[in-house]
């Protein structure tokens, strides 16, 4: 796979004795894991999803073509499952793929460069952006309109309103 790719899930464990695996999904719904064609692992191996059933809001049991026993399924534990960014539909307004945000320049409202988006995380209370500041250090900022009023993917930047601190 060449070009940007998007992480859709991670194999958590083998499931049963017929080669199925549990996958922690990062898609809108678990059944979307199979909607974009075959997935690719870190080592470049292509896996075709032959069967999939959602078991939780962020988990699915998956059967990959050519994997029919538990021992082989166990070798997939921890595997990251990717698709090409081009396989995904365009996001709706004010929706973004995390892969599109990572690497964007973080600027203040005047256009001064503050740093770079290093990651997008969700620890349970909503998405946060990890900003690595040009002056050193990093900080997590809530990914909300009041803090990040502008996201301009085409220009490769976001505008950040840093929270006021009492010092």
Image (cartoon, rainbow, N blue to C red):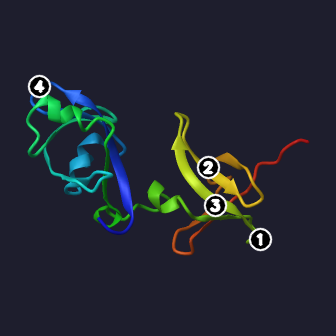
Q: Callout 2: helix, strand or loop? A: strand
Q: CA distance from mark 3 to mark 2?
A: 8 Å
Q: Nearer the viewer, residue 40 or 151?
A: 40
- Distance, label 1 to label 3, CA atoms, is 16 Å
Residue on which the image places disc 4:
17
Marker disc for residue 130: 2
Query: For residue 62, what is the image quadrant?
Result: top left
Q: Nearer the viewer, mark 1 or mark 2?
A: 2
In this rendering, which labeled residue sits more in front, label 1 or label 3? 3
Q: Is residue 50 above or below residue 94?
A: above
Of callouts 2 and 4, which one flags the residue occurring earlier in the amino acid sequence? 4
Disc on the earlier residue, 3 or 4: 4
Q: Which mark is residue 116?
A: 3
Where is residue 38? Give x, y as percent.
20, 55
Q: Earlier in the sequence, mark 1 or mark 2?
A: 1
Query: Is residue 122 something one can see in this rendering?
Result: yes
Query: In the rendered picture of this protein, how many numbered marks are placed on residues?
Result: 4
Foreground mark, 2 or 4? 4
Q: What is the quadrant of the N terminus in the image?
A: bottom left
Residue 28 shows up from this direction: no
Image quadrant occupied by the C terminus: top right
Going from N to C along the chain, the mark reached first, 4 or 1, is: 4
Q: Position of residue 135 (x, y in %)?
A: 78, 58
The crowding category of the residue bearing disc 2, from other C-alpha atoms within 10 Å (few below 14, some 14 to 19, many at least 20), is some
**In the drawing, does residue 167 fall left or right of residue 47?**
right
The residue singled out by tag 1 in the image is: 110
């Amino acid at each position: 796979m060449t070009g940007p790719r998007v992480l859709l899930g991670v194999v958590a464990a083998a499931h049963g004795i017929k080669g199925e695996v549990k996958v922690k999904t990062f898609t809108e719904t678990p059944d979307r894991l199979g909607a974009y064609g075959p997935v690719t692992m870190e080592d470049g191996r292509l896996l075709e999803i032959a069967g999939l059933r959602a078991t939780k809001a962020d988990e699915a049991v998956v059967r990959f073509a050519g994997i029919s026993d538990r021992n082989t399924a166990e070798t997939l534990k921890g595997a990251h499952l990717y698709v090409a960014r081009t396989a995904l539909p365009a996001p709706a307004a004010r929706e973004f793929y995390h892969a599109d945000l990572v690497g964007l320049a973080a600027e203040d409202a005047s256009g001064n460069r503050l740093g770079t988006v290093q990651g997008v995380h969700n620890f349970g209370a909503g998405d946060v952006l990890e900003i690595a500041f040009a002056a050193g250090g990093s900080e997590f900022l809530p990914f909300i309109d009041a803090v990040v009023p502008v996201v301009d993917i085409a220009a490769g930047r976001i505008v950040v309103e840093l929270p006021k601190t009492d010092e």
